Image (cartoon, grey):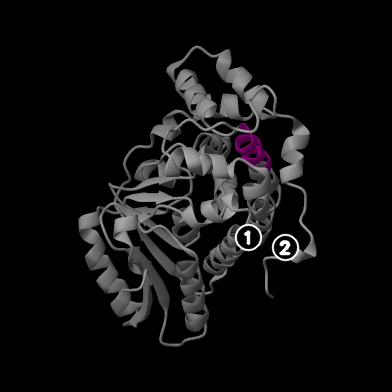
Amino acid sequence: MADIIARKEGRAGRLTFARPAALNALNHQMATAIETALDDWRHDPSVDLVLIDAMGERAFCTGGDIAAMYHAGRAGDHTVSHEFFAEEYRMNASIAEFPKPIVAFMQGFVMGGGVGVGGHASHRIVGDSTQMAMPESGIGLVPDVGGTLLLARAPGALGEYLGITGTRMGAGDAIHANFADTYLPEAKWDALKARLIATGNPTIIQGTPAPASALAALAPQIDAAFSAPDLAAIIGRLTRTDSDFATDTLTLIRRNSPLSMAATLALVRMTRADPTIRAALSREYRFTRRATAMGDFLEGVRAQIIDKDRRPVWRHTLATLRPEDVAQMLEPLGPEAAIWRD
């Protein structure tokens, strides 16, 4: 069976992640298959909408399948990651710019690359099992796949908080953060999918009241800390605050890559000032193209996924990280690193 199944049913083009044993992690071939299907359906009069879902109860998509990039990077070959990220980002832009409705049903874990698929759909449905996050700072990357655009659209300083800490969001949180649109109990998903396939009409989507958002309740504390001008100032505000939120948040920050967190903060704010999908992806690619050679990515993957010792040794500490270290990762790339084909 293919890792992603593309077919037409009724009035819909259907894309289904089919790697449940791997939590539907996205690989290069899957990204290419999604983009190819969207190209085929863009002008197909028999396709009124696209429906994206996933096999298995545990995950919609947990992110990129990064083991190949890790092993190639350790061997000194950085082209594997360059090519994967470029292809993935073209696919993300295809979803965000698609002229027909795209409906994504996102159960279980929706992280990293999964957010880059479902998060850019025009109609984003979540349920009780949904756990959504952009946890890239914990493996030495930045929220990419257009994630900085989604973070920039979150209310207040929530985008900075989510990008820096990698905090997981349930259904209510995801809707509050503008990462999702509709909450619907998962027992009702199959019936809605059948109606969408039969009618090709996304206006029939009707959700139910979403669970309360814990993040909404924390908004004053999040905004007070994460509106600070830089990472050091954010940490300073949290350190001076006597609250469970501040204590818990500092714990999250201290486990992540300082370089990645500082770059994330810069990217979210750049994107808030220039909120288009291609601009966001192009800026993210500045970091991810350099990540295996110059960043913390290989060490983060080693510690979290390969050796699983959860003890990464980052290139910088929070105390030694310099602004020029961040600037070097975010310098514009040359024409040889162009993503776009058109």
Within 10 Å of the Cα at label 1, are there few (<14), some (14-19), or many (20+) other Cα atoms?
some
Q: Identify which amino acid the numbered label 1 is placed on.
A: His
Is 77 colored magenta in this rendering? no
Do tag 2 and tag 1 residues touch (Cβ < 8 Å)? yes
Magenta-highlighted residues: 258-266
Residue at the disc numbered 1: 82
Which residue is situated farthest in the front direction here?
A: 75
Residue 135 in sight in this render: no
The dot on residue 337 is 2
- Residue 6 vs residue 277, the one in the foreground: 6
Q: Residue at x 58, y 37 (%)?
A: 160
Residue 252 to residue 74: above or below: above
Task: Give the mark nearest the N terminus, 2 or 1.
Answer: 1
Asked if residue 211 lies left or right of residue 132, the reply is left
Instruction: Give the position of the N terminus as an image quadrant.
Output: bottom left
Residue 291 to residue 137: above or below: below
SS type, badge 1: helix
* Disc 2 to disc 1, C-alpha distance: 9 Å
